Image: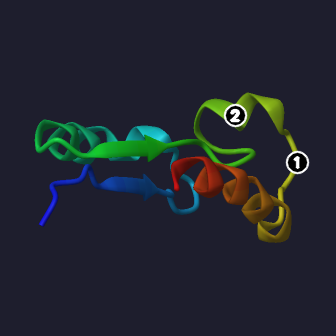
Amino acid sequence: MKNSIKTFVLVHAAWHGAWSFDRTRKKLEASGAKVIIFDLPGHGGDFGNSRQRIPFQTMHPGIYPILRRAS
């Protein structure tokens, strides 16, 4: 069987950001995996761009392009 690089897309939960996967990302990358992490709108590094509540329905569409690029 041919060796292939595994790709992991890690999506954080509420009140977190991509930073919450720092240790996990390092361990996965050390094993040879490709890791994709990002901040959902209004969270993590994007928190300063939003002073209002952002409903989940407006967050998940941003995930689809990232998943398409990862495949």
State the image coordinates of residue 58 (x, y, percent, origin top left).
Answer: 85, 62
Q: Residue tagged by mark 1?
A: 52
Q: Which mark is residue 36?
A: none
Q: Is residue 39 left or right of residue 49?
A: left
Q: Residue at x 73, y 64 (%)?
A: 60
Q: Residue at x 20, y 47 (%)?
A: 28
Front residue of 68 and 49: 68
Describe the element under mark 1 as helix, strand or loop. loop
Residue closest to the far front: 1
Question: Contact, CB < 8 Å: mark 1 with mark 2?
Answer: no
**Residue 40 location (% of width, % of height):** 66, 49
- Cα–Cα gap, marks 1 and 2: 12 Å
- Of 36 and 51, nearer the camera is 36
- Determine whether the residue tagged by mark 2 lies in a helix, strand or loop: helix
Foreground disc of the pair 1, 2? 2
Q: How many marks?
A: 2
**Kind of residue at disc 1:** Gln
* Residue in the picture at 15% in, 55% down: 3
Pinpoint residue 35: horizontal percent, then vertical percent: 36, 44
Q: Residues within 10 Å of mark 1 (few under 14, many from 20)?
A: few
* Quadrant that contains the N terminus: bottom left
What amino acid type is highlighted by mark number 2? Asp
| Residue at left offset 58%, top offset 61% | 14
Left or right of residue 22: residue 26 = left
Q: Which residue is mark 2?
A: 46
Q: Which percent across, then down, holds residue 24?
A: 24, 48
